[in-house]
Image (cartoon, grey):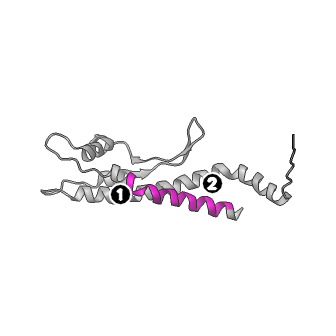
């Protein structure tokens, strides 16, 4: 049986070792950059959906103000995640998630005005590019 041994330069090995220790920080930064791209698209779609009514708009701006990005966290599988969503309750006690759900899917007498699904679909490529950009820049800097 043939045997091959490849020796890498010490400098390259040191760069790999440094990357493995910094990888959690780099991954958090990358998913946060991707999440920011998605949040911007959701915010733009939500603004358009709220202002697109037949009658006078009853929007208070609370739903748009509650939209945000969670800090990057690691789940049980070891994956780094961020969430784009709404903070819990409005001033009147109703959950913002309920209001967003009614806006997205509609209800009896109210037509749906989707803003989440189109944002997710249209921002996928830009999100991946933002994450790649962060990863490449951080790896070059090391």
Asked if the stretch drawn in magenta spans residue 53, the answer is: no
Q: In which quarter of the image is residue 136?
A: bottom right
Residue under the point 57% across and 59% down? 132
Look at the image and say whether residue 122 sits in the magenta stretch: yes
Seen as rendered, the residue at the extreme top is 76
- How far, Cα to Cα, is label 1 from label 2? 26 Å
Q: Which of marks 1 and 2 is nearer the N terminus?
A: 2
Q: Left of 16 or right of it: where is 77?
A: left
Residue 43, label in figure: 1
Residue bounds of the magenta highlight: 120-139
Tell me residue 81's x, y (percent).
52, 45
Marks 1 and 2: CB-CB under 8 Å?
A: no
In the picture of the structure, the residue carrying the numbered disc 2 is: 26
The quadrant of the rendering that contains the N terminus is: top right
Q: Nearer the viewer, residue 134 or 132?
A: 132
Q: Is mark 1 on a helix, strand or loop?
A: helix
Q: For the residue carrying disc 2, how many other residues have a C-alpha within 10 Å: few (<14), some (14-19), or many (20+)?
A: some
Q: What secondary structure do most residues of the magenta stretch adopt?
A: helix
Residue at screen point 67% across, 60% down: 139
Residue 95 x, y percent position in the rendering: 31, 41
Numbered label tally:
2
- Classify mark 2: helix, strand or loop: helix
Residue, far front: 1
Q: Nearer the viewer, residue 105 or 91?
A: 105
């Amino acid at each position: 049986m043939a045997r091959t041994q490849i020796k890498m330069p010490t400098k390259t090995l040191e760069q790999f070792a440094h990357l493995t220790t910094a990888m959690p920080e780099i991954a958090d930064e990358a998913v946060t950059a991707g999440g920011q791209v998605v949040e911007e698209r959701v915010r733009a779609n939500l603004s358009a959906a709220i202002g697109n009514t037949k009658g006078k708009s009853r929007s208070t701006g609370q739903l748009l103000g509650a939209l945000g990005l969670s800090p990057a966290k690691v789940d049980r599988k070891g994956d780094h995640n961020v969430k784009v969503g709404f903070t819990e309750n409005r001033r009147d006690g109703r959950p913002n998630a309920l209001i967003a759900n009614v806006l997205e899917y509609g209800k009896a007498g109210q037509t749906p005005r989707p803003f989440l699904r189109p944002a997710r679909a249209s921002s996928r490529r830009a999100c991946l590019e933002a994450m790649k950009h962060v990863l490449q820049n951080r790896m070059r800097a090391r």
